[in-house]
Image (cartoon, helix red, strand yellow):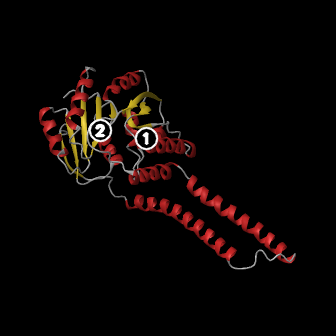
């Protein structure tokens, strides 16, 4: 078997309506390269016909390979599994919903051949998304950019091309709460971006509701920044300073005969305020401790039920 030049990795969860079009467009684009390639499909515990369709696609084209998870482990873990199994010199990550146009891959490959180790796609516009989704996405990317030491490019997703050297470096990163775009920036190497307009889903519904978006943002922030812990510390010092100042003011007021600070209302408000700050601080600490607990258990990132098409993998 000839050495694979390109590996396209597509995590899939209930994507039966998109698989045929994904295969058609990927095949059409990659045939233009004139070089060997593979399409690695990761079935992340789908409950529709996604897994069955993947096997049919492999039967018709042996360049299409399948990783079938034992259950749903999440998008970022599915991407990781695809990278673990990919055999190409360059690995391209793309979602199966076709919001990220496969046609951009040719431009990424050109940048890679110019010497860039990572070529990420920058969203200049997002079609078919609500103003709330667009606004929160922009806020998140700018927040994570400003509170982390690793400068993650603004308005980028996981759609990107990575050199084999980059992927090998990322394989050494075993954290459970993964943020692939942050990890790619952390390893370094020569990187550049290409701009595109993100399209609407070809079929199906989004698998990232608000709850999962919040969890994803939490993983990104706690995985690459200590700022939340520092905020809790600053709040503690700030409130302690205010308490000292308030105590001095109350003492002076009472000695001067001012009765404005007598009674329990002020005390009750302050106790509730301090209690709220303490609970928030404990919650922040708990988030980091929970991640430490997940790491020390050393469970595998994912469990594979079956692989198809990797028989020749060395």
Element at label 2: loop
Residue 314 is left or right of residue 262, and the answer is: left
Residue 195 is left or right of residue 51, and the answer is: right
Q: Farthest residue toward the right?
A: 256
User: Residue sitting at 51 percent across and 64 percent down?
Assistant: 283
Residue where numbered disc 2 is placed: 97
Residue 212 is left or right of residue 245, and the answer is: left
Q: Is residue 150 above or below residue 290?
A: above
| Real-space CA distance between mark 1 and mark 2, rounded to the nearest whole angstrom | 18 Å
The x, y position of residue 299, in whole percent, is: 34, 58
Q: Quadrant of residue 90?
A: top left
Residue where numbered disc 1 is placed: 181
Viewport quadrant of the N terminus: top left
Name the one closer to the observer, 114 or 104.
104
User: Residue sitting at 55 percent across and 67 percent down?
Assistant: 279
User: Residue sitting at 62 percent across and 68 percent down?
Assistant: 273
Q: Is residue 259 above or below residue 147?
A: below
């Amino acid at each position: 078997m000839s050495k694979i030049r390109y590996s396209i990795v597509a995590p899939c969860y209930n994507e039966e309506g998109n698989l045929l079009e994904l295969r058609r467009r990927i095949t059409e684009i990659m045939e233009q390269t004139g070089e060997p390639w593979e399409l690695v499909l990761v079935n992340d515990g789908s409950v529709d016909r996604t897994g069955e369709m993947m096997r049919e696609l492999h039967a018709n084209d042996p360049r299409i390979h399948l990783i079938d998870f034992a259950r749903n482990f999440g998008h970022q873990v599915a991407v990781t599994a695809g990278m673990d199994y990919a055999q190409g010199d360059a690995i391209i990550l793309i979602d199966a919903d076709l919001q990220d146009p496969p046609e951009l891959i040719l431009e990424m490959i050109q940048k890679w051949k110019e010497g860039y180790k990572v070529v990420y796609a920058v969203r200049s516009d997002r079609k078919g998304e609500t103003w709330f989704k667009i606004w929160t996405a922009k806020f998140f990317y700018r927040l994570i950019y400003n509170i982390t030491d690793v400068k993650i490019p603004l308005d980028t997703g996981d759609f990107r091309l990575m050199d084999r050297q980059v992927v090998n470096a990322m394989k050494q990163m075993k954290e459970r709460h993964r943020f692939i775009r942050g990890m790619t920036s952390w390893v370094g190497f020569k990187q550049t971006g290409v701009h595109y307009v993100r399209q609407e889903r070809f079929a199906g519904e989004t698998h990232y509701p608000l709850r999962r978006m919040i969890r994803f943002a939490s993983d990104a922030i706690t995985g690459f920044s200590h700022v939340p812990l520092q905020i809790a510390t600053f709040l503690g010092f700030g409130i302690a300073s205010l308490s000292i100042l308030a105590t001095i003011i109350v003492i002076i007021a009472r000695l001067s005969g001012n009765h404005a600070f007598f009674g329990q209302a002020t005390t009750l408000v302050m106790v509730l305020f301090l209690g709220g700050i303490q609970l928030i601080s404990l919650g922040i600490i708990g988030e980091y401790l929970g991640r430490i607990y997940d790491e020390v258990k050393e469970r595998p990132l994912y469990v594979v039920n079956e692989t198809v098409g990797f028989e020749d993998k060395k």
